[in-house]
Every structure is written in C-alpha cells, then in structure tokens.
Amino acid sequence: MLTTISNSIIPMVISAVVLYGCIKKTNVYEDFIDGAFDGMKIVVELVPTLIGLFVAVRILNDSGALGLITTALKPIASLIHTPDCVIPVIITKLFSSGSATSLMLNIFNDYGPDSREGLTAAIILSCTESLFYTMSVYLMAAKVRKSRYIIPCALLSLGAGIIVSILLANMLVS
C-alpha cells in the first residue's frame, strides 16, 4: 500500500501541475523548457565552485592536513567526551556530505553503528549541514557578492548543531 502511494506521488504532482496550467491557459511545455534552460544556466555557473570544493576535500584528505587538524583537536574532543574518530567527520562535513558519510561508514565498520562512535557520527551528520558547499551554491545562485554575516551566523548554528549532537549522543549512550 505504502509503495503504491510512493510510486504514484510524482505522477500525481506532475498531472496536477499540467492540469493547473491547462486551466490557466498557459503553454505548460514551453514554460517547462524555459525553466529547464534557466536551471541549466545555474548548473553551468555552479560547476566551477563544486569542482573547487571537491578538490579542496581531496587535498585535505590526501595531504595529511585532516590528520594534523584531528590531532590538534583531540584535547578539545576529550574535554567534551567526543570520540577522536568523529573529528574528521565534523571537519569534512563542512565541505562535503558525501565524504563525511564515507567517513561515518568507516566508523560503522570499525566500531559498529550502535557504538558511541557510530551514534555520535550519525547524529552529527543528521544535525549539521555541509556549510561551505551549501553557502557557495546558494550565494552563487543568488549572485550575492558580499555575504556579510551569513557565514559567521551559519558557522555559529553549525557549532550549536555539533554541540547538541554530541550532548544527545552522550545522553543516549550513558
């Protein structure tokens, strides 16, 4: 039953949009093509930013900088009762959800998904955003040149998400 509903939602929405367009007497196909063309322009504008972020994450991993940052942050992690192996997940999540998810899966393989490490990594990934990826995409799409307080406020909310995630994981494991 649920599968049938899930499979029929998208065709129903598309049908509703086409029906609404017909009722309003608009050229639905032409509007669709115009929207798709505008979307392609945005994609072309965003590709250099995305490539830059992917390269940055790769360099961070391959250069050993991630290991150095992790080592530097270990005292803080132990202060707030966070497993060391979660630090790379937090850092990588700033740039790429895919890379952070890969690191989380490694934690699952090493410690198990129900372990303190696995639970902490999973909650952090669920409660945070890949900030620099998201900001670059949205700011580029909106053609914002001066971000002013957007990045500092986003970093503050990300920090709050990380702290609450760690507290929640510690409460659930204790």
Image (cartoon, grey):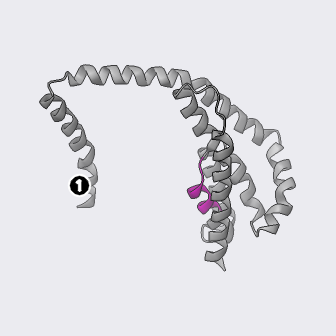
Tell me the residue at 21%/44% (across/down). Answer: 12
Residue 103 vertical position relative to residue 43 in the rendered view, above or below: below
Residue 114 vertical position relative to residue 129 in the rendered view, above or below: below
Q: Is residue 127 magenta?
A: yes
Tell me the residue at 65%/52% (across/down). Answer: 158
Residue 61 vertical position relative to residue 78 in the rendered view, above or below: above
Where's residue 23, x and y in %? 12, 31
Q: Main secondary structure of the magenta part?
A: helix
Where's residue 162, x and y in %? 66, 58
Tell me the residue at 25%/48% (across/down). Answer: 9
Where's residue 153, x and y in %? 65, 46
Viewer-proximal residue among 157 and 5? 157
Quadrant in the rendering for residue 148: top right
Quadrant in the rendering for residue 121: bottom right
Viewer-proximal residue among 131 and 147? 147
Identify residue for label 1. 4
Viewer-proximal residue among 109 and 174? 174
Q: Residue furthest bottom?
A: 174
Please identify the quadrant where the C terminus is shown: bottom right
- Image-based side of 137 in relation to 86, left or right: left
Quadrant in the rendering for residue 87: bottom right
Residue numbers of the magenta segment: 121-129
Q: Residues within 10 Å of mark 1 (few under 14, many from 20)?
A: few
